[in-house]
Image (cartoon, rainbow, N blue to C red):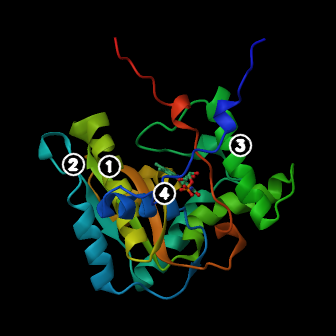
C-alpha cells in the first residue's frame, strides 16, 4: 500500500537551541524562527540611531559583483503621513481597487497554482481569521488588503529601488538585503513587514519621492514597534519541511 504523505502541510520543524550548535547559530535560529510579519504597529517612532543600526547591518548583504544596487528611502514623521495618504489615494483610485490598475515595475506573479496556491491561501486565511474577516466576505478582505497602503499604521516606511540596468539580479540582491533588514529589525526588537504591495504603483512612488526613471521600485516595508496585542500579529505562518524543498544527490 502506498502511503501518501501531505508533505506540503506538515509544519517545518523549527530550528531550535539543541545542545551542540554554536551560540551564533542558536542566535540566528532564534531570529529566523521568532521573526514574523508585523501588520499592526504602535505609533511610537523608532529612534534614528536604531534605524541606522538596522540599515548598517543590512549593508553587509552579499551581492553579485558587490554592486550593492539598493537605494533606500526611509520615511519618518510627516513624510510617513504624506506617503500614507498618497499611497491610499492611489490604491483607491479605481473603486473597488483592482489588480488591473496596478503598475509594478517588476511583473507580479501571473498565477499561483498547486502548493503555491495552497500556501498562499493558508496564510491569507490565517490573517483573515485573526482579524475576524469571514470566509467569502470580499468587502472585508479588500479592506484588510488596503491596510497595506495605510502602512498598517506604522510610523515608518521604507522603499527599496534597484537600477534598471541590473535587471533581475539587481532585484535578487535587493531580496537578500530585504532578508537582512528583516533579521536586523528582529534583533533590535522592531516589527517589520516586507510589502510587494508598496511596489504596486511604481510610477506613483517614483513621482512621490522624485526618483529617476532608471530606478525600479522592488519592494517596500512598514516598520516600527509591534502592537503585540493586535490580532493581526497573533498568528504564525508555517513552512514546508525540508523534504518538500531539497533533493539530495549523492551518486
Ligand atoms: C517579497 C515579499 C513581499 C511581500 N509582500 C507582502 C505584502 O504586500 N503584504 C503583506 O501583508 N505581506 C507581504 N509579505 C509578507 C509575507 O506574506 C510573509 O513573509 C509570509 O506570509 C510568511 O510569513 P512571516 O513573514 O510571518 O513568516 C511579503 C514578503 C516578501 C518576502
Q: State if disc 3 and disc 1 touch (CB < 8 Å).
A: no
In the rendered structure, find residue 89 and report the number of the disc placed on it. none
| Quarter containing the N terminus | top right
Say which residue label 3 marks: 121
Label 1 and label 4: CA atoms lie apart by: 23 Å
Relative depth, front residue between 197 and 3: 3
Asked if residue 237 shows in the view, the reply is yes
Say which residue label 4 marks: 16
Confirm or reject: label 3 Cβ below 8 Å from ligand 1. no
Q: Quick one: label 1 or label 4, which is nearer the N terminus?
A: 4
Disc 3, SS = helix
Say which residue label 2 marks: 62
Q: How many marks?
A: 4
Label 4 and label 2: CA atoms lie apart by: 26 Å
Q: Is 81 situated left or right of 165 in this image?
A: right
**Image coordinates for residue 137, horizontal then vertical, percent:** 86, 54
Label 2 and label 1: CA atoms lie apart by: 7 Å
- Residue shown at 62% from the left, 40% from the top: 100
Asked if residue 113 shows in the view, the reply is no
Disc 2, SS = loop
Q: Is 177 situated left or right of 68 in this image?
A: right
Q: Quick one: label 3 or label 2, which is nearer the N terminus?
A: 2
Say which residue label 1 marks: 176
Q: State if disc 2 and disc 4 touch (CB < 8 Å).
A: no
Vertical comparison of 12 with 81: above or below = above
Q: Quick one: label 4 or label 2, which is nearer the N terminus?
A: 4
**Image coordinates for residue 141, horizontal then vertical, percent:** 76, 56
Q: Quick one: label 3 or label 4, which is nearer the N terminus?
A: 4
Amino acid at each position: 500500500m502506498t502511503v501518501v504523505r501531505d508533505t506540503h502541510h506538515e509544519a517545518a520543524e523549527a530550528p531550535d537551541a539543541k545542545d551542540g550548535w554554536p551560540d551564533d547559530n542558536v542566535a540566528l535560529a532564534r531570529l529566523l524562527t521568532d521573526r514574523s510579519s508585523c501588520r499592526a504597529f504602535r505609533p511610537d517612532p523608532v529612534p534614528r540611531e536604531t534605524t541606522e543600526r538596522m540599515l548598517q547591518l543590512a549593508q553587509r548583504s552579499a551581492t553579485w559583483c558587490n554592486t550593492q544596487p539598493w537605494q533606500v528611502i526611509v520615511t519618518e514623521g510627516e513624510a510617513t503621513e504624506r506617503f500614507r495618504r498618497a499611497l491610499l489615494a492611489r490604491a483607491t483610485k479605481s473603486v473597488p481597487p483592482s489588480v488591473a490598475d496596478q503598475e509594478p515595475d517588476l511583473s507580479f506573479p501571473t498565477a499561483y497554482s498547486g502548493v503555491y496556491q495552497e500556501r498562499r491561501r493558508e496564510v491569507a486565511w490565517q490573517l483573515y481569521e485573526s482579524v475576524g474577516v469571514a470566509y467569502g466576505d470580499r468587502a472585508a478582505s479588500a479592506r484588510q488588503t488596503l491596510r497595506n497602503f495605510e502602512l498598517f499604521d506604522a510610523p515608518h516606511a521604507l522603499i527599496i529601488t534597484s537600477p534598471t540596468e541590473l535587471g533581475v539580479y539587481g532585484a535578487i540582491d535587493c531580496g537578500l538585503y530585504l532578508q537582512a533588514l528583516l533579521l536586523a529589525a528582529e534583533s533590535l526588537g522592531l516589527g517589520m513587514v516586507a510589502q510587494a504591495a508598496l511596489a504596486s504603483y511604481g510610477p506613483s512612488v517614483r513621482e512621490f519621492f522624485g526618483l529617476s526613471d532608471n530606478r525600479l521600485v522592488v519592494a517596500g516595508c512598514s516598520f516600527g514597534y509591534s502592537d503585540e496585542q493586535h490580532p493581526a500579529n497573533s498568528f504564525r505562518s508555517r513552512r514546508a519541511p525540508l523534504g518538500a524543498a531539497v533533493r539530495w544527490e549523492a551518486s
